Image (cartoon, rainbow, N blue to C red):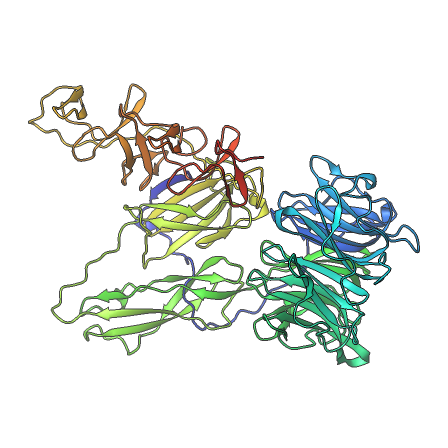
Amino acid sequence: MGKFKIKKKLLSMAIVLSMGVTFLSPITAHASTQTWKEVGNAEVSADQAWCTSIAKDRNGTLYVAYGDNAYGGKLTVKKYDGGNWVTVGSAGVSAFGLSSASIAIDSKGAIYVACVEQYSNISTPLVVMKYTDSTGWESVDNTVGNAEASQGNAEYASIAIGADDIPYIAYSDDYITSNPGGATVRKYDGSNWVLVGSAGFSTGQAFYTSIAIDGSGTPYVACQDYGNSDNGATVMKYTDSTGWKAVGTEDFSQGYASYTSIAIDASGTPYIVYSDGDNYYGNGNDAAVVMKFDGSSWVAVGNAGASGDRANDLSIAIGANGKPYFEYTDSESIPYVMKYNGTDWVKVGNAPVSVNSVSDTSMIIGSDGNPYITYIDYGNNQKATVMTIEEDKEITSVDSLNDKTVANGTDKNSIGLPETVDVTLSNGITTSAAVTWDNGSPAYDGNTSRTYRFTGTLTLPDGVLNPNNYTASINVIVQASGELPPVNDETTPAAVRIEGTPKVGETLTAQLKDAGGNNYTTSAAVTYEWYRLDNSDSEFVNAIGTGKTYKLTGSDFYKYIGVRVTCGEYSFEYVIGRILAASSSSSHHHHSSTTDTTTSTETKKDDNTIKKTGWTQDTNDTMYYLKDDGSKTIGWKLIDNKWYFFNNKTGAMVRGWYKSELGDWTYDKKDTVGQWFHLGTDGKMDIGWFKDTDGTWYYLCDGRDYGALGYMETGWKYIDGKWYFLKDNGAMASDTVVEGYTLGSDGALVE
């Protein structure tokens, strides 16, 4: 389980800060402070570079592939370690210099780069290089599948990872005699690159082939198809039943289409960006158009010609909020990134990414929701560069507040209106905003019985915008004169828990609990601070986030994450870990905490109790343990180095399953309210693996590195060198697949 601490603070030291945001009101927008900045050192490459392509792995770590002039234009891949760009394996790993490159990374962290090699002026084979930590870069003679993934010359290589980590490549295939240059897709079957459908499936020669795969594993390919009258944009998808078939109509662009790029959102909707010959701007230049397929036809997203100028080197990506971004270079080769705000296309940062001329651009959306773009910088000796920007986040949803009932005669200042509210941002994170309430509608009169609707204006943190003018609102019900005052049902906070999957890319939520284990709500200010820890006992020093939620990043991998929640005079801490790599097959969730001594609760002496000590048994064979004064022990008791639990009211020794109540079991200042324990037929607390009478296996913490002693574990657990999954009811899963991971008959993860 997670590590839990509780501290009660002096009222004079209570700190009121903004909590998780919920309700928004019109606010004055802050001036944007967005600025494009370099990621790491300005020069990703040590020498001139070309054919740059960017990707991120399961942890959110950035990788850039490029042709490295220091090695004759051969493939080099670098990754960002949080401060610098470091070479992956060795540099210059391809056999020849590159004319194009496309990088993708599977869920296990294997790196694939589709390389069109410039073997000679007339020979350009497609080779796929693969890197893993165990094998390094596979040599040209031992590349993925055949030494050459294509059977002849290839252009416009694009790679994507499909279901079951199968890599797919799309390219313009010059080998086909019936349709030279037609679009071809292959996938790796474990030994060879095999055709997906027929080769050269486009109507004519395909330019700018781009591949994407939806959540069901269906591949889509976008290209400029020279087999159509206008050389326009076409998107095709493959199914086993239909083969390659056009999505909507072929040649759906207004004019010829260049620099086609495709992306698919979480709902399976394909988006395409391209430079359209009919979107004519000055000097004969063509502008960018973004379209999406609505299920029956291709429709424009925002204004056509979104770039407002010639658009080259296009690529498209879907943001964390489901809205598309695209990057391009203009007629002066200056790079820009555009995003769709729901109505129009706007420049990210209101400025170009760089004032220098660039080429070979490539863009992704990072795990933090920000765009990352790589390119060749002609203002810096043609070296590879990566840029990003910390975007302002927008409010996307607002929680609702429960009605408040107050006694007749209550003035506004005594209502107890919330000081802060929770809101969800466009990157999926929940944060907080202070609220300034109006006087109600109708104007509040505490002496008149009726319902009043209050609306709150929000003061948002820096970097948070409210373009849709959300407002906080709450109903206040004034009772009739003489009516009994409402019962104050606001409970006392007793603990905090972290909810969510401890895996990179997932979002964790801090949830206060009351004594009954229920979610605790309050009108008082609540503050949240998140910490990255080396172990479960590390001090909370440097906060890495605020707000009710925290999104795990690559920097959190194999670390512990702690949260400190302050509510009035109370402060609570909780720790989970270690954090799992996203979609990893070799590591899983691991909840840890330290162990320590516990305390048991005692009652006052009963003068009628026979002053006998130790174990005793009544006529019903119920066991008790009498203290030195003859009274019955209640709660937890350590006897002969074994833990027992005695009913809090009767003192009877408990056998079987027991759900802990507040104060029952405190371990390293952690209260296990609402958690399950199992006591054997002899009353001793079971720990470690436990097989119930129905044959179901459970894991009850043995006090090592998994949680408080005896606590029934749930979720992914790393036990004695193996991963197991314990269901919500604690039962061990076996002979099944959980979250894409196969578990054997013994419940252990099949490696």
Foreground of the two, 111 or 734: 734
Instruction: Determine if residue 297 is in view.
Output: yes
Left or right: 411 as drawn, with respect to 357: left
**Outermost residue, right direction?**
121
Foreground of the two, 243 or 205: 243
Left or right: 295 as drawn, with respect to 652: right
> Looking at the image, which residue is at 33% across and 30% down?
693
Where is residue 632, by image quadrant? Answer: top left
Left or right: 441 as drawn, with respect to 133: left
Q: How many marks do you count on the picture?
A: 0
Where is residue 732, by image quadrant? Answer: top left
- Quadrant location of the N terminus? top left
Instruction: Determine if residue 315 is in view.
Output: no
**Outermost residue, left direction?**
608
> Looking at the image, which residue is at 66% across and 68% down?
247
Foreground of the two, 394 or 234: 234
Percent coordinates x, y for residue 341 in the rendering: 58, 71
Percent coordinates x, y for residue 432 in the rendering: 44, 60
Percent coordinates x, y for residue 102 in the rendering: 75, 53
Q: Is residue 95 above or below residue 282?
A: above
Foreground of the two, 473 or 182: 182
> Looking at the image, which residue is at 45% across and 73% down?
26
Percent coordinates x, y for residue 310 in the rendering: 77, 73
> Looking at the image, which residue is at 48% across and 46% down?
501
